[in-house]
């Protein structure tokens, strides 16, 4: 039964994504019904084959949505048919984004980057900085899957250096750099959703997010240097020893440079194509990104003359890998129904009014300062950054805010950065702990509390300056 329901989920969620695009370009009543029914069927199959613990949060969201909608006078049928399609564009994005990662397994891109850049990475500060930058680029392709991949690579590079001091060095570089991608990387679903639904300027939002991310990287380097002194470990000496070994093993450096250039062209081609289309055509990110990723990936395999590998990767993804995303998809479908119920009932306005009341009651607080704290609190309740951003942005999109949407997006995503770093219930920390064997509390709260406090004030200094001085 579980095997059948897993197959049923894969088919129904695929139909859901396909119908999303069909009904977007050719809207019909029959198409809308099929879209809604495929989403409902996907949820039903998920509840059949997922274990009980994985269904706690989706169940809570669904029950809350039903209660809110029924109390406000709505019908269950309306909630099911209209609420289930609230997350249609995000589901399509999440279904397609993982295929970017296939390309990283085709060539030794990461090894080549480290090989070419070894002269730059010859000190602890430079290595930490370089690791964070490379991990952000890889996260563009693999999302949080970049964490275990980069951890394995760096651990292999650093050999037997496995003390707590070295695990702090490796783990914080990877976790912090991934968390910072939620500020600016357009393939991160939470960022794309926030920009799309709050109607923020893509160019300005990416630029300010990138600059804050860069400032966060420099802040992380400072904290790493401080910890190096506290631990009494010479990171630089250990790195230099490993670089010498790497240079001795280095093969064709020309080939490494070619792969680095090729990787750079891949990154720029996808990013620029999406950006230019968004600017010139005015289409939303959630509509543009999935088809561009598909076209870009297929073009890569065809240019490389590897259609067989493309076929194998596609089979594996649809027949095996997709079912492991069922909890995430179910969570988002349930969150969409809750957003629909909240917006239909008008509760969203009351929630936002409550935040503004707090702003008026406490003179030194304002909405942009409180908003990240809301995201962090929800993160500690077990809701991941994507779910939280979906819920909050879904409510805020129907509220007239006095703040520019770019600052609202930055305030929200800064909260998701901190939530990723501290909450023991969020997937990136869990994935890192599975890789390095340390507890989620140590990898998250203990290693990153001081850094996140400093980062919060760093972002707020920028946000409040922009709001009070420029606006």
Image (tube, grey):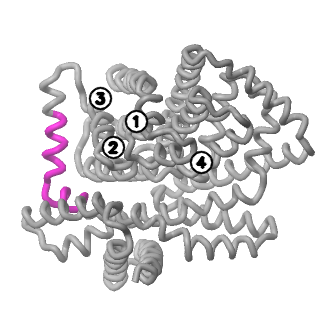
Q: Which residue is mark 1?
A: 422
Report helix, strand or loop for mark 3.
helix
Q: Which residues are magenta?
A: 338-356
Q: Is residue 375 above or below residue 463?
A: below
x, y percent for residue 30: 33, 85
Placement of 221 over or under 286, stated as above or below = above
Disc 2 secondary structure class: helix
Pick whichever of labels 1 and 3 is earlier in the sequence: 3
**Is residue 124 shown above or below 443?**
above
**Mark 3 lies on residue:** 369
Q: Is residue 212 left or right of residue 465?
A: right
Closer to the chain start, of discs 1 and 2, is 2
The mark nearer the N terminus, 2 or 4, is 4
The quadrant in which the N terminus is found is bottom left
231 lies left or right of 52: right
Please rate how many residues cluster around mark 3, counting C-alpha atoms within 10 Å: few if below 14, some from 14 to 19, many from 20.
many
Category of crowding for the residue at label 1, using alpha-carbon neighbours closer than 10 angstroms: few (below 14), some (14–19), many (at least 20): many
What is the CA distance from the residue labelled 3 to the residue labelled 4? 33 Å
Going by the image, does 172 lie left or right of 50? right
Q: Tell which tag, 2 or 4, sits nearer the viewer.
A: 4
328 or 411, which lies in front?
A: 328
- Crowd tier of the residue under label 4, counting other residues whose Cα lies within 10 Å: few below 14, some 14–19, many 20 or above: some
- Percent coordinates x, y for residue 292 in the rendering: 59, 62
Residues tagged 1 and 2 counted as in contact (Cβ below 8 A):
yes
Q: CA distance from mark 1 to mark 3?
A: 18 Å
Residue tagged 4: 148
- The residue singled out by tag 2 in the image is 379
| Spatial CA span between label 2 and label 4 | 22 Å
């Amino acid at each position: 039964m579980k095997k059948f329901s897993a197959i049923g989920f894969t088919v129904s969620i695929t139909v859901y994504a396909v119908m999303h695009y069909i009904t977007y370009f050719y809207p019909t009543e029959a198409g809308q019904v099929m879209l809604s029914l495929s989403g409902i069927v996907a949820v039903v199959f998920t509840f059949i084959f997922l274990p009980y613990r994985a269904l706690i949060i989706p169940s809570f969201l669904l029950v809350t949505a039903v209660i809110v909608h029924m109390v406000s006078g709505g019908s269950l049928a309306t909630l099911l048919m209209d609420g289930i399609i609230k997350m249609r564009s995000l589901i399509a994005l999440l279904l397609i984004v993982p295929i970017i990662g296939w390309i990283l397994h085709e060539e030794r891109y990461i090894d080549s980057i480290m090989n070419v850049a070894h002269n730059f990475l010859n000190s602890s500060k430079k290595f930490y900085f370089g690791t964070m930058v490379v991990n952000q680029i890889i996260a563009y392709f693999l999302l949080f899957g970049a964490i275990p991949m980069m951890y394995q690579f760096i651990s292999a590079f650093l050999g037997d250096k496995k003390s707590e001091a070295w695990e702090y060095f490796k783990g914080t570089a990877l976790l912090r750099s991934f968390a910072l991608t939620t500020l600016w990387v357009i393939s991160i679903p939470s960022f794309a959703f926030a920009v799309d639904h709050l109607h923020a300027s893509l160019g300005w939002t990416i630029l300010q997010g990138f600059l804050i991310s860069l400032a966060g990287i420099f802040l992380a380097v400072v904290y790493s240097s401080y910890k190096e002194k506290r631990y009494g470990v010479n990171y630089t000496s250990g790195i230099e020893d490993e670089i010498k070994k790497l240079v001795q093993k280095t093969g064709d450096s020309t080939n490494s440079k070619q792969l680095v250039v090729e990787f750079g062209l891949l990154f720029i081609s996808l990013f620029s194509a999406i950006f230019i289309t968004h600017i010139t055509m005015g289409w939303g990110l959630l509509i543009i990104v999935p088809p561009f990723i598909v076209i870009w990936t297929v073009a890569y395999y065809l240019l490389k003359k590897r259609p067989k590998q493309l076929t194998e990767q596609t089979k594996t993804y649809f027949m095996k890998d997709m079912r492991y995303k069922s909890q995430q998809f179910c969570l988002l479908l349930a969150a969409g129904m809750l957003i629909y119920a909240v917006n239909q009932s008008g509760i969203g306005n009351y929630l936002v009014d409550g935040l503004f009341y707090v702003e008026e009651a406490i003179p030194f607080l304002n909405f942009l300062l409180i908003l990240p704290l809301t995201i962090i609190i929800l993160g500690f309740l077990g809701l991941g950054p994507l779910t939280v951003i979906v819920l909050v942005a879904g409510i805020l999109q129907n509220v007239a805010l006095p703040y520019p949407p770019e600052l609202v997006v930055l305030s929200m995503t800064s909260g998701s950065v901190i939530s990723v770093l501290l909450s023991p219930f969020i997937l990136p920390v869990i994935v890192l702990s599975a890789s390095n064997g340390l507890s989620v509390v140590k990898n998250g709260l203990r290693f990153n509390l001081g850094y996140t406090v400093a980062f919060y004030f760093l972002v707020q200094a920028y946000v409040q300056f922009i709001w009070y001085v420029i606006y």
